[in-house]
Amino acid sequence: MRKLIILIVLVISFCSYAQKPLFNYPIKKLDHARFIANYTLQFKEDTLNPDQKRKEDFLLFLGEEISLFIGKNLYSSEIEIRGITSRAEFQQWADNHIASKNFSRFLYRFHKNYPTGKITCYEHISAGPFLYEEEMNLFNWELTNITDTIAGNNVQKATTYFGGRSWVAWFSPDIPYNDGPYKFNGLPGLILKIYDTRLHYVFEIKNIVKPVKYTPIELEERDYYQTTKFNYFKARDNFYNNITDYAANAGIKLNDDQKATMVINSKLRNNPIELVQK
């Protein structure tokens, strides 16, 4: 059923932006990646089933001035669908994509320091791609003198409160990027591990690599719905709360059992990373 939800999101995205070629948007190069940090996220999306854990891999492209944080599978998908020119071709790609199980649970992506001093947040929801901006200095960090090692790197502990959760971060002063997974930034070194104190969301570094070839940090220039963070979360919640209606509007036929199961599964997504969404 999770596959069906992902397929609905893909089809709605297709229907909202049908043009020829369908996904050939103008690409703006913002920077290029000097290093790529690979993270794994372990998360609990249902508070009623706290023992059920899920995993997803993410990429952090670290440029000279700008970074991009995005799901690994989402990044691969966006590269693959560029140049698709017909609905049949897209349907074939979607079928293969769903069958491979290489899809992202999280469809957001963040550019940090674009524009300067801002985090630009993007996600495709229902009628189209949404965009909102936040200040980069979201975090009031408290540094400690506690040290350790992660993946062979010296790290130091810091704490903060963000989005309704208390967070513990381990950053490496030896890696001179004041960046990290998700929106986290602002420490004197790259964040290698960060988790909320209830262990609902745990990001941890897998490795850091230097690209073997030129890897641009890009922005697809679409007609984004520019909005506020509050309205973005409101739109996303509305989509999942009414996902069967959106499926019907997109021409996806569901039987009663599928509709009921989708409604139940949507309600299981009750533990967002940001509990306070404003």
Image (spheres, rainbow, N blue to C red):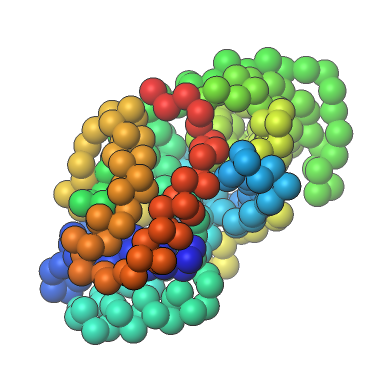
94, 208: nearer the viewer: 94
Where is residue 119 shown, x and y percent of the image? 40, 33
Where is residue 65 shown, x and y percent of the image? 45, 39
271, 73: nearer the viewer: 271
For the question of whether residue 169 can be seen, the reply is no
In this rendering, the count of numbered labels is 0
Residue 241 as seen in the image, left or right of residue 19: right
Residue 106 as seen in the image, left or right of residue 246: right
> What residue is rendered at 24% in x and 84% in y?
88
Where is residue 175 shown, x and y percent of the image? 68, 39
Query: In terms of image quadrants, where is residue 18?
Result: bottom left
Residue 161 as seen in the image, left or right of residue 267: right
Image height of 155 relative to 77, above or below: above
> What residue is rendered at 47% in x and 45% in y?
267
Residue 162 as seen in the image, left or right of residue 224: right
Q: Considering the image in quadrants, where does the C terminus appear?
A: top left
> Residue furthest toward the left?
19
31, 23: nearer the viewer: 23
> What residue is rendered at 13% in x and 69% in y?
19
For the question of whether residue 137 can be seen, the reply is yes
> What residue is rendered at 81% in x and 49% in y?
151
